[in-house]
Amino acid sequence: MLNLIQDTIVHAEPQTLGAASQGAGHAHGQTDWSVAAIVALPLLACVLTGLCAALRVKSKLPAWLTVASLAGAFALTAKTFAAHFMGAESHAFVVHVFDWVTFSWAADVHAQGPQTNELVANFAFYLDSLSALWMLFVTGLATLIALYASEYMSHDQGPGYCRFFAAFSLFVFSMACLVMADNLLLLYLGWEGVGLCSYLLIGYFYKKPSAVAAAKKAFIINRIGDLFLAMGVMLIFVQFGTVEYSVLFEKAKPYIELARAGNFAQIPFVVKLIPCLLMGGAFGKSAQLPLYVWLPDAMEGPTPVSALIHAATMVTAGVFLIARTYPLFLLSEVALPAVAWVGALTALLSATIGMAQFDIKRIMAYSTVSQLGYMFCGLAVLSPSGGVFHVVTHAFFKALLFLCCGAVMHGFAGQLDLRKLSGVMKMPGWRVVGFGMLIGCLNLAGFPLTAGYFSKDMILAEAFVTPGTAVIGWILLLTAGLTAYYTFRVFFRVFVGPVAYEMGDEHHGADHGHDHEHGHGQGHGHAKDHGGGDGGHHQPHAPGWAINTVLATLAVLSLAATGLYFVGGDHGAVARLVDQSSAGFHSPLAHHESGAGQAPDHGAAAGAGRASGHAVVSYVPEFVRARAHQGEVHAGTFFGADPHKAMYFVSAGVGAVGIFVAFWLHLAGRKTAAASRADALLPALGPLPGWAQGKWYVDEFYDFLVRKPLWVLSHILYLIDSYLVDGLVDFVGAAPKAAGKVIRPSQSGELHGYALGMAGGAVILIVIVALVAT
Amino acid sequence: MSLMAVLAQAGSPAPMAASTLAHYLLVSALLLVIGLIGFVTRRNLIIMFLCTELMFQAAGLAAVAFGRYHLNLTGQTLVIFILTVAAAEAAMALALVVLLFRRKESLNAEEWQDLKG
């Protein structure tokens, strides 16, 4: 597999040079501008919706502009994907749009390390199977969610509507830059761009203090991660003299060879530091410990935003970063283990928090954090294909889940408390939402034969296959059970059971005051200012065609994603695509007896063949003991069985237990919306449920650890400022004042005095002149 | 062609003697001192204003005397300017005096001591 990536690089190389020298590369003359248009279309939509705002458009025009542009971007992505990445062989290529950054300076002859005197970062797109796959689901989901939002945001038609879709399109543009960048600088631009759009959209309801606070929290915590990413990029430039992937991987090759031979001691510390810094950036953006706290609060944004940005696409940027720079992560013996532990602990911690929450959107948010942990584990236990496959399946089913929650929220006037909703599926017009939710929940819970089941199994199995990571596997397995429980807790409480509901309070509901006709009295129909007392919202209203269409499409796609596991090679189509990309090798220490070991035998059927193909040697003592040179090949097992086979049953069993517990506690025998059998059980668990409901008080801990000291420090600085600095400034002002007090009496107001003074002065002057002159 | 040459061609008188200049300057100095003493000792705004005019003319006289002594037109030019300015200033100063009088119904300069700094 290592050869594969090197092949990729070699193939990419001449085209990079070609593209750089000839401008628009000749070899891909016709793809060139269609690839550039993938990025340009969302930007165009952003500009046009901005114009709509300037022209005070009050119709749904911004939504249709956005949907059309994004659909165009999706179509172009699909075309590019079909043209280049559908076959068994695919080669990365670079599409050069324009020269962006080119600095050169005189080389310092005394400098240590590799000599470089040029920084080149072009506005160019590096398309390989990984970025194409990512763009495919980003643009596809963005199109669907924009369509959903056209109805969901309809209460805000006017400036807010334009603002929403402008930021939405800008987000897709930034995400496209991030994913398709051919260098780390452009990736960083996209990275900051998505962060900005996330901030803008979380704070969409800017009159609501909690939304503003959440937006600031997200932005500030992301800054911490971004600082690490920036340092990582700088260090890469200092160390390798380039930020372009193709050159970078080429330059990192000697180190990769060292790592492959297990000689980690010979790799300089600075090089090992690079993945650790990049990791920090990934943890910030993808909401992992210790920086996960912003994501649950980000649910203050409108639900389509939660679905697209904070569940399906942006938060997977960290996973993308690691997958993209996977070769670098193999250079340090601590990088991937650290990722694995962070991912596993985040998955477990946020799953426990999710179990105790009552706000269904919050539950979904914690589940996103938890599933992101899974993805990181997938990458870290040497299964980038599992991690990326989970990204793809999760993108579909989590977007679906969020949009279903959003439909409920929209229909019940902002009600999100699962104790106040019950049996929604049985109400007229809510069937699509109910079935969508069911499909999403089955996927999330890893119900057998769903896409989520297969992607989760890949990660779980690889955790047991890779030596030294079995503990991670057990943590993830436990998390899988918890996930199944909290997922179906939501479903059993809200969507089935006796019909009962309580409408939300428009005043603090995040999505308040849509002006659909029914449920409104004549007096406040179409109230433009929808903050105030819509007392008319006593009837829930079922979602309209746009929402239902999108939900149905996503439900079908979530189910269809299962197929990705069964087509296109060994571990499915996604695994093939990942293997062809920069993330495409399992381990630097992996021994492949022959390339034939990876012959495309069918995934489900070739357990034994794969076990040898998985010749993964412990690259980690308990994560790092390099035993490659001994030639000893032993893949891990699950109690003597092939983990891949075993997981089909074990994870299905764990999921089933979780679902059954949820059924027993939250559905069986439940008569009302508020109370269930679980309530009786809670006291037996002591303070734990309360702590979990309080999110393990992590926010409070950070408050104590960071905010309080900062508060004290800033007050000390305030005192220094007001007494020392201000004192100095005041002194400068006071000195002339005092001098004036001394001189002022000379101004007596007596005209004769002045005249005498002048005359006396003149006499003195004359005397002086006379004395000097003679 | 210098003024001196012009005057010589016209057969004009010889330059003024230094002793004659001293007389003119003495008169000029007397005028200045009289004006100054008047300015300092009197309280009436109009009288004080007249004293300043007196000092003005002292300066003008000295300028003319020096111009004649040096046989050039600088002093006379200066005096024309002095007269022009004095005329304008007299108009303005008298107007001010009128305004000040209207305020306090008095021409006493000491009435305005409260303008001190």
Image (cartoon, rainbow, N blue to C red):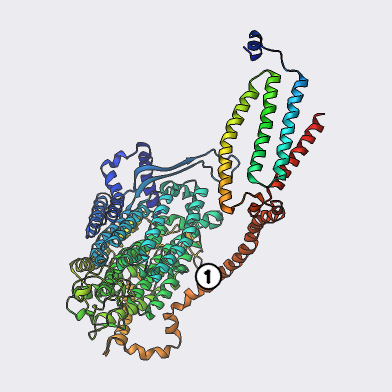
Which residue is pictured at 36% across the width and 70% down the height? A299
- Front-most of residues A484 and A546: A546
Q: Secondary structure at mark 1?
A: helix
Q: Is residue A625 left or right of residue A569?
A: right
Q: Position of residue B21 (x, y in %)?
A: 74, 22
Q: Foreground: A53 or A30?
A: A53
Which quadrant of the view contains residue A406?
Answer: bottom left
Q: Quadrant of the C terminus of chain A?
A: top right
Question: Residue A642 appears at what percent x and percent y?
Answer: 36, 70
Residue A14, percent from left and from top = 37, 41
Give the answer, above or below, for where B44 lies relative to A418. Answer: above
Subunit of mark 1? A
Asked whether A538 or A184 is in front, the reply is A538
Disc 1 crowd, CA 10 A, few/some/many (<14, 14-19, 20+)? few
Q: Is residue A23 visible?
A: yes
Image-quadrant location for residue A165: bottom left
Q: Quadrant of residue A382?
A: bottom left
Amino acid type indicated by mark 1: Arg
The residue lying at 46 percent from left, 65 percent from top is A221
- Judged left or right of residue A471, residue A47 is left
**Residue A544 in the image: above or below residue A165:** below
Nearer to me, B15 or B54? B54
Pointer 1: what residue? A707
Q: Is residue A465 visible?
A: no
